[in-house]
Image: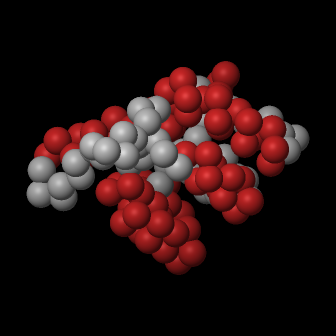
Amino acid sequence: MTETASTDAHESVEEFSLRARKWLAENMPRIDRERPPPTRLDQDASWQRARELQKRLYAGGFAGICFPTEYGGLGLTMEYQKVFNAESSGYEMPLILNIPSFTICCATLLDIGSEEQKRSHISAA
């Protein structure tokens, strides 16, 4: 996460939501509802695109919203994640990476993984 994109520890959910809305409009591609982007799990281009989008989210300070800061996350509550999800509706997101990786695998590692596993597989460092 870039230093300028880091979250102020006192940023309210409303301020976070406004910042996310502005950042998304400036940095993430909108989804054309008539022609949504193809997401084929069997095509390398889909995975490359998801990686690119995830890198954008991280650089902008919007990756790992609820993940602990020691593993590269923002350490915020689920309320912040919910407002980001609402703001990001209509934008292209790296869902093929996020659903299996962050939602399932990383959450499991955070709950039961060793410190070495957490640092190795979750940390962005």
Question: Along the horizontal axis of the image, is 111 left or right of 124?
Answer: right
The residue that appears at 68% across and 52% down in the rendered structure is 83
* Quadrant in the rendering for residue 54: top left
The residue that appears at 60% across and 29% down in the rendered structure is 23
112 or 52: nearer the viewer: 52
- The percent position of residue 119, horizontal first and vertical second, equals 49, 54
Compared with 53, 67 (above or below) is below
Question: Along the horizontal axis of the image, is 106 left or right of 10?
Answer: left
- The percent position of residue 45, horizontal first and vertical second, equals 17, 41
How many numbered badges does the structure rendering display? 0
The residue that appears at 72% across and 42% down in the rendered structure is 17
- The percent position of residue 74, horizontal first and vertical second, equals 66, 46
- The percent position of residue 114, horizontal first and vertical second, equals 50, 69
Q: Which color scheme did the rendering employ for the protein?
A: secondary structure
Residue at the far bottom in the pictured view: 112
**Is residue 74 at all visible to an observer of this figure?**
yes
The residue that appears at 80% across and 48% down in the rendered structure is 13
Compared with 7, 42 (above or below) is below
Question: Along the horizontal axis of the image, is 11 left or right of 51?
Answer: right
**Is residue 68 at all visible to an observer of this figure?**
no
